Image (cartoon, rainbow, N blue to C red):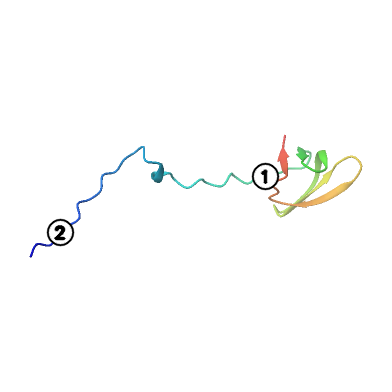
Amino acid sequence: MKTDHATPRRHLATSPFNKQPVAAPPVEEYAVHDQVTHDRYGLGRIVTVEDGTAVTVDFGSRLMRINTPCAKMAKL
């Protein structure tokens, strides 16, 4: 009786199954006086930074403490 040996599969560079995992976007670093925009609160300016865990933002009508990273906030 003959044993069947599997032949190695060819590597196809254009195969849709060879996609590399998408890396997470880099975490934004905020500094005092950076201008930011928030999806809910609008345009604001960073007032304080707490060791990369949270920032306090002055949105004109109110001060908000926002935990970082925040998907709804972007640095301008």
**Residue 76 x %, y %:** 72, 34
Residue, far bottom: 1
The residue under label 2 is which amino acid type?
Answer: Asp
**Residue 61 x %, y %:** 92, 42
- At a point 7% along the width and 65% down the height, the residue shown is 1
Q: Which residue is mark 2?
A: 4
- At a point 84% along the width and 49% down the height, the residue shown is 64
Q: Is residue 58 left or right of residue 75?
A: right
Earlier-in-chain disc, 2 versus 1:
2
16 or 33: which is nearer to us? Answer: 16
26 or 31: which is nearer to us? Answer: 26
24 or 45: which is nearer to us? Answer: 24
Residue 63 drawn above or below residue 4 = above
Q: Which residue is mark 1?
A: 29
Helix, strand or loop under label 1? loop
Dot label at residue 62: none
Residue, far left: 1
Residue, far front: 1
**Residue 28 x %, y %:** 66, 44
At label 1, counting other C-alpha atoms closer than 10 Å, the crowd grade (few under 14, some 14-19, many 20 or more) is: few
- At a point 71% along the width and 55% down the height, the residue shown is 53
Helix, strand or loop under label 2? loop
Question: Which is closer to the viewer, label 2 or label 1?
Answer: 2
**Residue 63 x %, y %:** 87, 47
At label 2, counting other C-alpha atoms closer than 10 Å, the crowd grade (few under 14, some 14-19, many 20 or more) is: few
Q: Is residue 1 left or right of residue 5?
A: left
The residue under label 1 is which amino acid type?
Answer: Glu
